[in-house]
Amino acid sequence: MRLVVLVSGSGTNLQAILDACEDPSFGCEVVAVGADRPAIAGLDRAERRGVPTFVVAVADHPDRASWDAALADAIGAHDPDLVVSAGFMKILGPAVLERFGGRVINTHPALLPSFPGAHGVRDAMAHGVKVTGCTCHYVDAGVDTGPIIAQRAVAVEDDDTEGSLHERIKVVEREMLVCVLRELGERHRSA
Ligand code: GAR
């Protein structure tokens, strides 16, 4: 299964995918990594593995619609079976979703439908939840509203900061994402 992975930052979820792909039985290959900004660790991780990268920045386009169209073209150039938004901090637009509809997944650091958006960990802590976690879901036109594929729970500790909680969530999030991709890869092969 050909994957294009989209990142905006450190790319530790991407790294987990790249590591899993080292095993041929995993059944997935990262054919490109895309970002909405240059000079991020996620792009370095891809380059170290010799995976092609591309950057499509909002600021380089006159409006959001042309950014969306350019992103769809950049992704499409690598002919993916699945697009994985792994810490990509932009809402994907209609051009991307129409072209890859039903073939885009996202990972989010909260138990959806609670705490969607860019600050899932902070919002869950502010609410005072005792259990939070992460969700992998298909992307639809809403913000973190698409059908849920998998979730993992993580307990909130009394002395947690947003950073410490997010780091614990990311440990189980990486395992969840690899597990989801293994399953989707198997389904893809037998389809
Ligand atoms: C992950 O926790 C991911 O769920 C989150 O950003 C982190 C990226 O970590 N994404 C969102 O909050 C999207 N709303 P990484 O760059 O180390 O993979």
Image (spheres, rainbow, N blue to C red):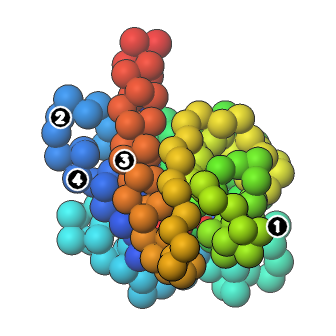
Q: Earlier in the sequence, mark 2 or mark 3?
A: 2
Marks 4,2: beta carbons within 8 A: no
Q: Earlier in the sequence, mark 2 or mark 1?
A: 2
Q: Residues within 10 Å of mark 4 (few under 14, many from 20)?
A: few
* Closer mark to the observer between disc 4 and disc 2: 4
Marks 3,4: beta carbons within 8 A: no
Q: Is residue 179 above or below residue 61?
A: above
Disc 1, SS: helix
Q: Which mark is residue 38?
A: none
Q: Which mark is residue 19?
A: 4
Q: CA distance from mark 1 to mark 4?
A: 34 Å
Q: Which residue is mark 1?
A: 65
Q: Position of residue 30 (x, y in %)?
A: 34, 50
Label 2 beta carbon within 8 A of ligand 1: no
Disc 4, SS: helix
Q: Which residue is mark 3?
A: 175
Q: Nearer the viewer, residue 34 or 76?
A: 34
Q: CA distance from mark 2 to mark 3?
A: 18 Å
Q: Amino acid at mark 1?
A: Ala
Q: Is residue 81 left or right of residue 139?
A: left
Q: For the point 51% across and 79% down, which residue is it? A: 159
Q: CA distance from mark 4 to mark 2?
A: 11 Å
Q: CA distance from mark 1 to mark 3?
A: 34 Å
